[in-house]
Image (tube, rainbow, N blue to C red):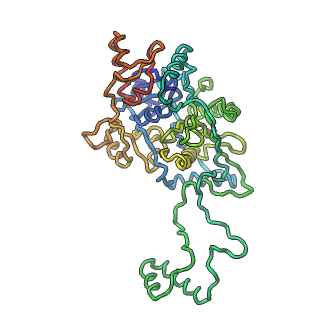
Amino acid sequence: MASVVEYKGLRAGYHCGYCDSKEGKASCGMWAHSMTVQDYQDLIDRGWRRSGKYVYKPVMNQTCCPQYTIRCRPLQFQPSKSHKKVLKKMLKFLAKGEVPKGSCEDEPMDSTMDDAVAGDFALINKLDIQCDLKTLSDDIKESLESEGKNSKKEEPQELLQSQDFVGEKLGSGEPSHSVKVHTVPKPGKGADLSKPPCRKAKEIRKERKRLKLMQQNPAGELEGFQAQGHPPSLFPPKAKSNQPKSLEDLIFESLPENASHKLEVRLVPVSFEDPEFKSSFSQSFSLYVKYQVAIHQDPPDECGKTEAETPPNGPDCGYGSFHQQYWLDGKIIAVGVIDILPNCVSSVYLYYDPDYSFLSLGVYSALREIAFTRQLHEKTSQLSYYYMGFYIHSCPKMKYKGQYRPSDLLCPETYVWVPIEQCLPSLENSKYCRFNQDPEAVDEDRSTEPDRLQVFHKRAIMPYGVYKKQQKDPSEEAAVLQYASLVGQKCSERMLLFRN
């Protein structure tokens, strides 16, 4: 089934939640009646972002706070000192029940819904992106289904219906079976084959002298000592005390048997057909309302599905939208909404119990999602990035995303990725920047053949070249061409633009 979108056009001059400007924000948006994972992957690689069913793209050279798509490279990621503090804080809480003193400011991934256009805000399901054809009329659905039967093209991976989901549970202090954690084996009784055989006291003294010399001068004196004809040590080299632990080592550090708390992270597909999602929905939604009221001061009455596909070469859990539920002692304390796409894990939203703000759950969940991306990469090699939403250099509260290194920002003109270190000097001088330094470079996927754009009109699918002959309103052509320029040539030929 193809993606079906309804372009809403440009919306400018509305309130910005980042700088509090009353009329500074500008974006273009479209309503996704259905969306394939490949189309959404290509869209976010052009600066789009979803908020529920609504997919929007900031007008970067007009909006008051330019929002640059940012992605982290998990395979090279090393946690910073502040990240390690958050992980240690969680471990201390789980092991001993220690609660840190003082307040902790959290950094949830895109924990704001200000990006949604106000006119469509009430229609957005904030918990998931159930973008299926049920929102279309029966006539439209039947037309698409009949069109699909006549088409010989391979159907793209659907973003919104759960099929053969393989559940994964991560956490409880123990590593998942597919997460490689390197640990030193515990010593056992009797002969240890990993240790050298017994030696004479004279040899042991020489070994101690060699180790002492190595500590004093690893280069000179050690080489001189070995040059005298002494054989190299039979002991395995001692691990350096300053050797950094991996992210997995820090997350899955073993807990004592009498630990005060138990944390379990469950990956659940966003689908009421999934029993685990259905059974936990009430608790999850209650937590969402509590979070919105406490953190964002939303009235309770204003707190209101992508589908999973399991291709043979994809991750075991499939692609689509999922909830990562954080269960503490049998109770959900946080939910991270993520999209698993062909090339990345995209963080959509996080909500958590304000009573546990002291655990810095925004940072903790981001680190867990980075580790989860690395785990998925082991099975699906092309899935190797972690998308963190938008980086807003002009907003101090949103600059923290740049601390997850290495990371890249998307050039808003040529849509190539540029290391964030190369972008920051330009952003210090100007809110809006073209990161690609090649003045001759252009958008490689720009719309060059708009007549090939696919339009869904009056129960029929047709190329725009045919559709425009039936239209007399010049504003219609301007809207369609604007849409084509924003989604790019590939998506314009794959997605169906709904016009009524």
Residue 51 spot, x, y in % from top left = 51, 30
- Residue 423 vs 499, above or below: the answer is below
Relative depth, front residue between 488 and 238: 488
Q: For residue 332, what is the image quadrant? A: top right
Q: For residue 161, what is the image quadrant? A: top right
Residue at horizontal 55%, vertical 48%?
379
Count numbered badges in the picture.
Answer: 0
Which residue is situated farthest in the bottom direction here? 202
Does 319 sit left or right of 432 as displayed? right
Residue at horizontal 71%, vertical 58%?
256
- Residue 250 vs 359, above or below: the answer is below
Which residue is situated farthest in the right direction here? 258
Residue 259 spot, x, y in % from top left = 72, 54
Residue 226 spot, x, y in % from top left = 46, 84
Residue at horizontal 48%, vertical 14%?
459
Residue 363 spot, x, y in % from top left = 55, 46
Relative depth, front residue between 413 and 19: 413
Q: Is residue 27 at all visible to an observer of this figure?
A: no
In the picture, the quarter occupied by the C terminus is top left
- Residue 467 vs 92, above or below: the answer is above
Relative depth, front residue between 216 and 444: 444
Q: Is residue 180 at all visible to an observer of this figure?
A: yes
Residue at horizontal 39%, vertical 27%?
24
